[in-house]
Image (spheres, rainbow, N blue to C red):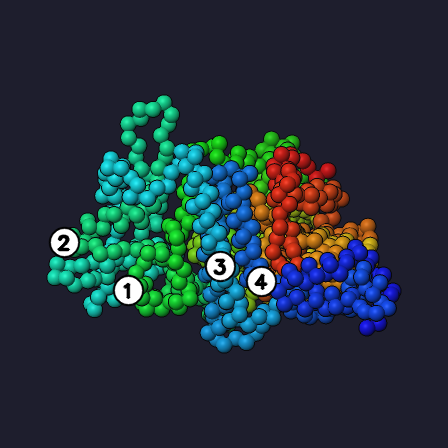
Amino acid sequence: MKVDVEKVKVARKRAGHRTVANLEVVASTIEDAAPAKAALAAVAGNGANAEISSAAPVVREVSLDDPSLYMNREISLLEFQKRVLEEARDTRNKLLERVKFLSIVCSNLDEFFMVRVAALKQKLSAGNKDLSIDGKTVSQQLTAVRDRLDELMQAIYDCFQKQLVPGLQRQGIEIVDYSELDHRERAAVDDYYIATIFPVLTPLAFDTGRPFPHISNLSLNLAIVLRDTDGRQHFARLKVPQQLPQLVVVPQGPVRKKTAPPQRFVWIEQVIAANLGALFPGLKIVESHPFHVTRDAEVAIKEIESDDLLETVEEAVWRRRFRKPVRLQTDVGISDDILGILIENLEVNPVDVFRVHGPLDLTRLRQLPSLDRCELKDEPLEPFTPPEFSAHADEDIFTVIRREDHLLHHPFQSFLPIVDLLRKAAHDPEVLAIKMTLYRVGLGSPIVKALLEAIENGKQVAVLLELKARFDEESNIEWARALEREGVHVVYGLLGLKVHCKIALIVRREHDSIRRYVHLGTGNYNPTTARLYTDFSLFTADAEIGADATDLFNYLTGYSHKSDFRRLLIAPVTLRKRMVELIRREIALGEGGRLIFKMNALEDKAMIRLLYEASRAGVRVDLIVRGLCCLRPGIPGVSENIVVRSIVGRFLEHSRVYYFGNGGNEEMYAGSADLMPRNLDRRVELLFPVVNPKIVRYLRDVVLEKYLADNRKVRLGKPDGTYESPRAGTMDSQAWFIAHRTLQAD
């Protein structure tokens, strides 16, 4: 094979003089790594070219359509769950925070089964022949997912039993089995059972006259075998009440020692199992075992056939309760007979049965972080309210926004200015109209309260309330009806599109003209999640953004074929096209190009391919991707100029920021959109430009710089889709933002 010496020189420069040995390592780390192997072959050389080949990296250009260049989205999601689990393992975190992370990863896996595994099973049943981004069939994906899940579940229980339980015990918090309680403790727990648990329980028999009961999603149950006085055996199911504490406090006896006795807890299902005789008097308890069911929650909403979207969503939510199980969890001691009854009547595939060494449903550990043990938890964060937005500010909020754009960085800075803006608008006699989108509102929303106050004060109020927000449908339906009852114009969503953008528009009369004030965000209008997620809020009175906001709401509430906007990037209209143009502009700059993208997920193949092209052109690309990432960094000749970081810490990284160097004439956008097909093509999303030089400097030189400097909570992506943590550093970006939350964009 003849080697083009000039191509070798260029490739060596881009790859940082990687050697053949480097390529062998890369190739060995990627399953079916044809591109890396091809790159290795290209530099192997022979004969007269051996000297050049020994140091040259990639010469032959790999096709960017090769499936092995892309990471499977389901496997990448499970890799993210592993990173969450690492926080539970990390002894540098406070103990009860570690318990919280374990609860979170188990909750995440519940959703993974309900949505992702369920979707794959639906495709399999439908005979779907489409291949995934990495070239796998549906069946191959399910097999790979199950293998990873087995490993992950084992790691979760190892963490719980070998690290957290002993660690809690050393701190005087003991989770014990009922069998470990002494006589006095058992008596006290049994009294609690009789007084509190027993009245709530409803045993359900299964026989010829009574059909197998419905097992609700994510419910914990006991499967019980009983023997009657005539020797006949019966089967019963008992649901463990979810509304009671899942870890029952073991009452303390008289304290004789100077040191405080440990706080002891026992799982509620063990207390129930030990007292089943009270529920079945005269029968013998042969055996009982806990089981936990996860159902398919991926329900298609048939919008096209619908005359009333609200009723259609309500029906879909109701149907979700009866979807097929996608997972059955039991303890390891369950008998084959009981397991057979469950498999047959729940219609569960045996491969979807997971036997667990330990208590089922560890999401219930979320009870422990509420204990009054401040030394075992992070210090509470009190968000900072900038002086210009405080109750004692010299100027009203409209004057502040009119003077210049303002940015808030949540949760480090308060969410209250958003609520205050809407309250001010609700009572300001010069405000004519308020329009906004709502996605995940939450309970007792002050946002909704402000909108209701506005309608009471004669304002025109229009709300796009997305009913199809997964797992928030019922809450959103209630809010939609409450708003409609008071006269708010409520739009439920758009046909075939989910409205995910975060925007509020206030139309105000000022002297003889109309001025528009706009709030734009990366996160939901939800004060609860605003304390848990990292997000950005922009307040602006920019006339062009205001005009775009008006056009957007006309598109959302009426009929419009609007195909261009002045400043805002709107999906599915302009966002994809403009992002392609902006990335290609950096590609044209070659080594002078610069891209920094921060997002929740990167899945879109066309966007990943563009980023590969940018890397090949010499553009330096930093990606901060919290969750799934289908791009493989560090492949010579493909992505050696791309670094993927994932930051998992105290707060959920939720903000999206896209920075384009543009040869020094930089551009920056933030908003609601990730680079996924659903965000770019099947949702109404919004990215807004950041134009105020002070805010640009703050986002570039403070926020993004601190994320890129993080060496404590960061994980670095590898070519095989796994991640590694430096673990030696002390730079925790989120902790830095907490310590410097009074820092302004100036």
Q: Earlier in the sequence, mark 2 or mark 3?
A: 3
216 or 96: which is nearer to us?
Answer: 96
Q: Which residue is mark 3?
A: 149
Q: CA distance from mark 2 to mark 4?
A: 54 Å
Picture quadrant where residue 338 is located: bottom left
Amino acid at dot 3: Leu
Q: Is residue 409 left or right of residue 324?
A: right
Residue depicted at x 31% and y 37%: 250
Q: Extreme left residue here?
A: 230
Residue depicted at x 54% and y 49%: 84
Residue 521 visible in the current orientation: no
Q: Which residue is mark 2?
A: 282
Q: Extreme top residue here?
A: 258
- Residue 111, horizontal then vertical, whole percent: 47, 57
Of circles 4 and 1, the one toward us is 1
Q: CA distance from mark 1 to mark 3?
A: 26 Å
Q: Is residue 195 left or right of residue 565?
A: left
Q: Which residue is mark 4?
A: 73
- Residue 42, horizontal then vertical, whole percent: 77, 68
Amino acid at dot 1: Asp
Q: Tell me if mark 4 has few (under 14), some (14-19) or many (20+) residues whose alpha carbon lies within 10 angstroms of its own.
A: many
Residue 625 visible in the current orientation: yes
Q: CA distance from mark 2 to mark 3?
A: 43 Å
